[in-house]
Image: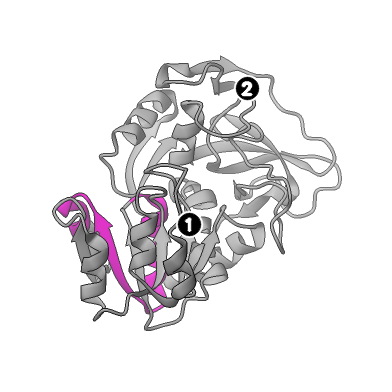
Amino acid sequence: MNVFEIREPGSITGLRPATRETPVPGPGQVVVEMKAASLNFRDLLILKGQYPNLRLPVIPLSDGAGTVIATGPGVSRVRAGDRVAGIFNQNWIDGPPPRRALALGGDRDGVLSEQLLLPEEGVVKIPPALSFEEAATLPCAAVTAWNALFVSGHLRPGQTVLILGTGGVSLFALQFAKMAGARVIVTSSSDSKLEKAARLGADEGINYRTRPEWDKEVLARTDGEGVDHTVEVGGAGTLSRSLACTRPGGHVAVIGVLSGGQAEIPVFPLLSKQLRLQGIYVGSRAHFEAMLGAIVQNGLHPVIDRVLPFEEAPEAFRAMEQGNFTGKICLRF
């Protein structure tokens, strides 16, 4: 079967086509014929060798969907013909996160492969209302946003949510927050991206290039109180401003490292405002399944910027690197 492998990380040229043996399912395992995959910023970090504890060679990408084509002995959760997506962390089924992650596309081989061998516990059935491409956007970005807002954040109607950027996690957070009846403020470096966010329901947009002290702008638009929740995907370059414009007792979900992974945390505002700073590393299968129920009930559809063929995987990574997209970049097999 055809796959893409990372053998020499550092640049996009390190992503190479390869072949692997066709998988055969053992007890409790299933083989999924992949139909679609999507990219996350994490995948670009892995390709560039900027991700911790990376094992090589590795088949990249954590997010994909397809059809079960074979099952091993004892499999009961799914059967051949079912449409499924793999969960991001293959050993986080429910409850608190495990001590050791087993994430697709990093800790173990990912989904950039024509066929994928997974334990039956590591897949969820995807609803008929979602295409394979739409389902392929969910395992990392969508579950992360769901966890940040509803599991960690306990978001309530009428609260205000600040969302940084218009990437995959950010737009899912926007869609989920509006679904829950929240007011949403979005930041971006692009007015056109802010216009797209407004069409998805964003109540306010702030261009951080024209307003570099965007935290003060957020405070002004919340009558000096600050937001209830901040979806912090920027990392080191944005964290201090996110803390500054979150209300006393508010919640900051730390998700991304777009502007760096090492930050000096301003401790005094964290203490004086009694903020809750929560790291989010995707979520469990139970979170995924709860999210799917809400997506179906509310008729929500993921935002997909573009879909490229499987053979053009390097071009998808280039698009991710350039950053000129809104929503998700997908591959069709």
Q: Is residue 128 visible?
A: no
Badge 2 marks a residue whose secondary structure is loop
Residue at the (46%, 48%) spot, across then down: 137
Q: Residues within 10 Å of mark 2 (few under 14, many from 20)?
A: some
Task: Look at the picture and state if 90 lies above or below 106.
Answer: below
Marker disc for residue 254: 1
Marker disc for residue 60: none
Q: Which residue is mark 2?
A: 56
Q: Is residue 186 left or right of residue 267?
A: left
Query: Bounds of the magenta span?
Result: 167-195
Residue at the (48%, 27%) spot, across then down: 47
Comparing 84 with 47, the one in front is 47
Badge 1 marks a residue whose secondary structure is strand
Residue 181 on the magenta segment: yes
Comparing 254 with 96, the one in front is 254
Of marks 1 and 2, which one's residue comes earlier in the chain?
A: 2
Label 1 vs label 2: CA separation?
A: 28 Å
Task: Look at the picture and state if 121 lies above or below 201.
Answer: above
Q: Name the spot of residue 197 as percent of width and height, x first.
A: 25, 60
Residue at the (56%, 36%) spot, across then down: 34
Task: Look at the picture and state if 282 lies above or below 204.
Answer: above
Task: Look at the picture and state if 77 lies above or below 216.
Answer: above
Q: Name the spot of residue 149 as percent of width and height, x first.
A: 48, 68
Q: Is residue 261 left or right of residue 195?
A: right
Comparing 97 with 112, the one in front is 97
Q: Amino acid at mark 2?
A: Leu
Image quarter in which the N terminus is found: top right
